[in-house]
Amino acid sequence: MFNAEKCYVLKITHARSPSEYTYKSNNTTLTETKSQTYLGVNITSDLTWNSHVGNITAKANKSLGFLRRNLYACTKEIKNMAYKTLVRPILEYSSSVWDPHTQTLVKQIEAVQNRAARFVSGKYSRHMSVTAMKKDLNWEELETRRKVARLITFHQALAGQLAIPARKILRPVQRTTRQTAPKANNFTPIAANKNCYKQSFIPRTLVQWNSLPSHITTIEKKEEFKTAVRNYYNFY
């Protein structure tokens, strides 16, 4: 039996005048909310990720601050390991679901890694390049890491390894021209009117999937595909 006091109603809609309903459980009216965390991901009524990104960056910065206070005298290797173990996972948990497309949020997330690069490298001067520090540390941009994570998840969905009915949603490209034939394992792009749908996992990742070479999209084994995609995007 559900505890009505711990249950909330989250209406997801872009309608200017949404329908109003009162939801009850055991004769108790459920509280309506505009934002709620579900399995570690903050979902809002307008399906934007500002709130979630704000939460994870605040949490990651707090963890990074803890490392800076306690590991300031440690070696570069230990600091590097600590960042990858205790901070970066906070910024990447379930990122295939919420990966933002706006530069404002992309930069907000990367700013945490930039601060971490200065901490690990021990270089805090404003005149020193953070990009060079990350290259020296063999750190990829978090935006690229999220892109690769989405492609790997997409590959698993196509293989039927996840509870995502990708094969039922997607349509293979059939049309050919005199000049070219469709690449193997490519799918018809999904039309979307709302940006929240266009930039969601399947429509967005599908575009990137279709841009991959056929020798990668036809790989069946997960680990081989993962290695091929990482090499394609020049991962360290």
Image (cartoon, helix red, strand yellow):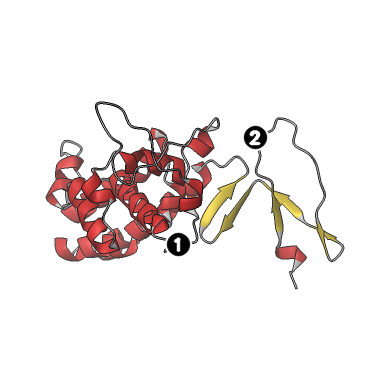
Q: Which mark is residue 162?
A: 1
Q: Earlier in the sequence, mark 2 or mark 1?
A: 2
Tell whether 227 sits left or right of 148: left
Q: Residue furthest right?
A: 27
User: Is the residue 177 above or below the residue 31 in the image?
Assistant: above
**Mark 2 crowd level (few <14, some 14–19, many ≥20, 10 Å Cα):** few
Q: Amino acid at mark 1?
A: Leu
Q: Position of residue 90 (x, y in %)?
A: 39, 58
Tell whether 177 sits left or right of 192: left
Q: Residue at x 65, y 45 (%)?
A: 34
Tell whether 147 sits left or right of 79: right
Question: Which quadrant would residue 71 be assigned to in this image?
Answer: bottom left
Q: Amino acid at mark 2?
A: His
Q: Nearer the viewer, mark 2 or mark 1?
A: 1
SS category of the residue bearing label 2: loop
**Mark 1 crowd level (few <14, some 14–19, many ≥20, 10 Å Cα):** few
Q: Which residue is mark 2?
A: 14
Q: Position of residue 158 (x, y in %)?
A: 40, 55
**Along the line of sight, the residue nearer the viewer: 144 or 55:** 144
How many numbered marks appear? 2
Q: Position of residue 150 (x, y in %)?
A: 37, 50
Asked whether residue 75 appears in the rendered view, the answer is no
